Amino acid sequence: MPRSDDAHAPRRKLLREIVRLADVAVFGTVSETYRTCGRPGCHCQRRGGSKHGPHLNVSYRGENGKTTGYYVPKGAEEATRHGVTAWQRLQRCLRELAELNKDRNLRRAREAE
């Protein structure tokens, strides 16, 4: 029979990871856009000219279920990308923790019978 401390090790590791991810997580999805500007004669105005970008945006579902979002300035792009990736990993960790909790609850119920 595994030691009680060993049985809790995966859960403790997962909880540490959740805390670490929660510190940087950013809710949403990242997208890049390319745009034309309003300056006459700019290269982006010519047919086949390259547009300005990429411009980073984050979109997410707001409180009323409507998709909303915001522009991410250049200085925040790296941290935002990292945060969105952390959010996705955080969700996976929480699902894994929920599964461990379910298993623990069922095991305790069987042991109490």
Image: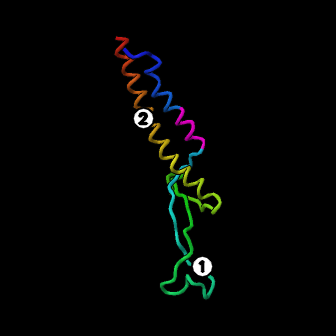
- In this orientation, which residue lies closer to the viewer: 111 or 11? 11
Is residue 93 rendered to the left or right of residue 58? left
Is residue 102 rendered to the left or right of residue 37? left
Farthest residue, direction top: 113
Callout 2 amino acid: Glu
Residue at 59% in and 59% down: 77
Q: Which mark is residue 92?
A: none
Callout 1 amino acid: Cys
Residue at 39% in and 17% down: 2
Q: Residue 22, relative to residue 75: is it above or below?
A: above
The answer to whether the residue labelled 1 contacts the one labelled 2, judged by CB atoms less than 8 Å apart, is no
Range covered by the magenta-colored residues: 16-23
Residue 28, visible in the rendered structure? yes
> Which residue is label 1 attached to?
37
Residue at 40% in and 22% down: 105
Farthest residue, direction right: 75
SS class, disc 1: loop
Residue 47 point in image, percent of width and height: 49, 87
- In this orientation, which residue lies closer to the viewer: 68 or 103? 103
> Which residue is label 2 attached to?
96
Q: Residues within 10 Å of mark 2 (few under 14, many from 20)?
A: some
Q: CA distance from mark 1 to mark 2?
A: 46 Å
